[in-house]
Image: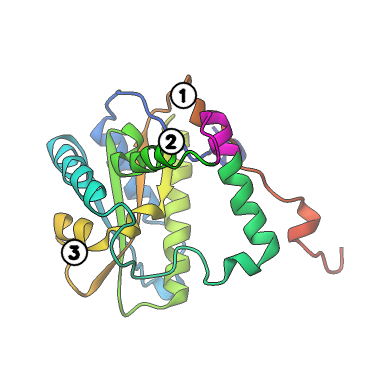
Amino acid sequence: MNVNDAVLSRRSIRAFLDRPVAPDIVRRVLQTALRAPSGCNLQPWIVHVLTGDRLSALKALMRGRVAEQPEGEMTEYDITPPGLRDMSDYQRRLMELGQDLYGHLGIARGDKVARAAWNARNFEFFGAPIGLFCAIDRRMGPPQWADLGMFLQTIMLLLREEGLDSCAQESWALYPATVGGFIGLPETQMLFCGMAIGYADPDAPANRLRARREALEDAVTFHGF
């Protein structure tokens, strides 16, 4: 698979097969991903990977936590910008994604119970056999957060090369205390996101979703071409 194919075939998968992933594949992908770009070579990413009994224990813990506190704990960063409702294009894209996803799932706009049940699947890693967490030292700034994005994208593209799928999940940032306590994050580190890793379930309605993208001309201005 070339890079172009990996980019075009990568999607946020929200239903995985109950099929194990060979540990050597995960190690190989992460070893290669460490070559991702990093400003000043700070390499700010801090990664925890769970599977087997440890992953099962986390899922059991999260089922209870989500039931007790469905809105989450106090987040440590804004997952979406404050005032997003006043940012018409950005808000539109968010709304379109939700409409498209729930449309594939057959969940009505006003069905809060069904939506909550679906959202809780985030904290099961959508059934994936591998769960990854990415954290960062609290002393790092926006440039280093950008490095995390490049690192995570590199992981997701390498997974595609291996025939695997993924879903990057900022939703885990809703429970920083619970997750941080479980994986042993010190106070000096902040949880950024999770990532589900495994083999996509080809029959799952959620996996029919392909998020819309704006036209090239809406995002790019060419100078001197």
Q: Is residue 36 visible?
A: no
Cα–Cα span, label 3 and label 2: 26 Å
State which quadrant residue 87 falls in.
bottom right
**Secondary structure type for disc 2:** loop
Q: Nearer the viewer, residue 148 or 187?
A: 187
The tag on residue 204 is 1
Q: Main secondary structure of the magenta part?
A: helix
Instruction: Give the camera-side residue of 162 and 111.
Output: 111
Report crowding for label 3: few under 14, some 14 to 19, many 20 or more residues within 10 A (C-alpha): some
Q: Are marks 3 and 2 in contact (CB under 8 Å)?
A: no
Instruction: Kindly report which numbered mark, 1 or 3, lies closer to the viewer in this rendering.
Output: 1
Which disc, if any, is residue 185?
Answer: 3
The vertical placement of 21 against 82, above or below, is: above
Tell me where the magenta segment starts and ends, as one range: 100-109
Report how far apart the C-alphas of labels 1 and 2 lie in the structure.
8 Å
Q: Residue 34 in the image: state x and y as whole percent.
A: 36, 56
Circle 2 crowding by C-alpha within 10 Å: few under 14, some 14–19, many from 20: many
Quickly name the residue at label 2: 14
Q: Secondary structure at mark 1?
A: loop
Which circle's residue, 1 or 2, is located before the other in the chain? 2
In the image, what residue type sits under mark 2? Arg
Alpha carbon separation for disc pair 1 and 3: 34 Å
Q: Amino acid at mark 1?
A: Ala
